[in-house]
Image (cartoon, helix red, strand yellow):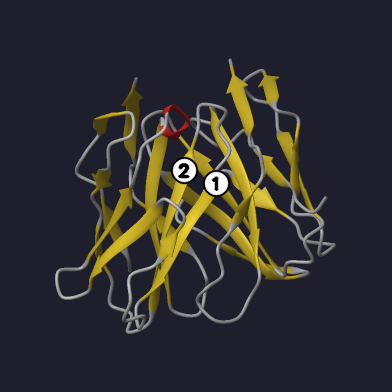
């Protein structure tokens, strides 16, 4: 089955530690995205990538870093510089070309930092 | 820049009745897309329906239809014959330009009562 996997589903970390969230897709999509969702809020874009070895900052990139070494993988690192890292993180992917490019989402990772 | 406004934090509907979820958008792009996603309590984002800015007919997908009024910049989602499984958060989103980013609203929590 084609889709997006995110692991783990729940992640707990101590304050001051960096943590990396995994995102893998086998849909052969060129573009991948990371979103953050806080309770009662919509999704906010952290980073996105349209091609391997290239990525752009979204609306709330501070305190986060990404890499895109393979088309299938787009890991997100939440660094200790992120002031409020506790949130629900969603990874997505899409084709590139035209406007009918709905984004397909993974199941998400719920990160709790104490 | 794009902006999505969903003015209904919560909506209630009786099973088997129709319900309309409101969405207004603001964009400077000439070509753009409008999307609706469903988010159940499990957290995954499920794509429901898409409308292109140049599409003259309203989009439909099964029990979902998008009431697109371009002059009013509105893209309301209509769910016909509501089912208990429709209870979820619903997000409206827009895209535009060449970067394929999605901008989401804050969502509407729909509760379907038996």
The answer, for residue B55, to whether it is visible in the render is yes
Q: Badge 1 is on which residue?
A: B46
Residue A44 appears at what percent x and percent y?
A: 45, 48
- Label for residue B38? 2
Above or below for B52 versus A68: below
Mark 1 and mark 2 in contact? Answer it, CB < 8 Å: yes
Say which quarter of the image contains residue A110: top right
> What residue is drawn where x is 70% and y is 28%?
A9
> What residue is drawn where x is 66% and y is 18%?
A14
How many circles with numbers are drawn on the protein?
2
- Label for residue B6? none
Above or below for A57 versus B55: above
Given the image, what chain letter belongs to the residue carrying mark 2?
Answer: B
Left or right for A92, reference A53: left
Given the image, what chain letter belongs to the residue carrying mark 1?
Answer: B
The answer, for residue A62, to whether it is visible in the render is no
Are there few (<14), some (14-19), or many (20+) residues within 10 Å of tag 1?
some
Above or below for B14 versus A81: above
Closest to the observer: B59 or A9?
B59
Say which quarter of the image contains residue B59: bottom left
Left or right for B103, reference A114: left
Left or right for B89, reference A6: left
Left or right for B1, reference A66: left
């Amino acid at each position: 089955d084609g889709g997006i996997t995110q692991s783990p589903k729940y992640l707990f970390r101590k304050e001051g530690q960096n943590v990396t969230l995994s995102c893998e897709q086998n849909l052969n999509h060129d573009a991948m995205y990371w979103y953050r969702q806080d309770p009662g809020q919509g999704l906010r874009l952290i980073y996105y990538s349209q091609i391997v070895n290239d990525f752009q900052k979204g609306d709330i990139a501070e305190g986060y870093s990404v890499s895109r070494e393979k088309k299938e993988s787009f890991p997100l690192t939440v660094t200790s510089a992120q002031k409020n890292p506790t949130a629900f993180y969603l990874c997505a992917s899409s084709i590139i070309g035209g406007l009918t490019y709905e984004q397909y989402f993974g199941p998400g990772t719920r990160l709790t930092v104490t | 820049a794009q902006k999505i406004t969903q003015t209904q934090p919560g909506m209630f509907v009786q099973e088997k009745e129709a319900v309309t979820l409101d969405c207004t958008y603001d964009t400077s792009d000439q070509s753009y897309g409008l999307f609706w996603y469903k988010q159940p309590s499990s957290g995954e984002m499920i794509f429901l329906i898409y409308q292109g800015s140049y599409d003259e007919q309203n989009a439909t997908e099964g029990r979902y239809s998008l009431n697109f009024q371009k002059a009013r910049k509105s893209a309301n989602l209509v769910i016909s014959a509501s089912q208990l499984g429709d209870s979820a958060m619903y997000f409206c989103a827009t895209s535009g330009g060449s970067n394929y980013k999605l901008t989401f609203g804050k969502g509407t929590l729909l509760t379907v009562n038996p």
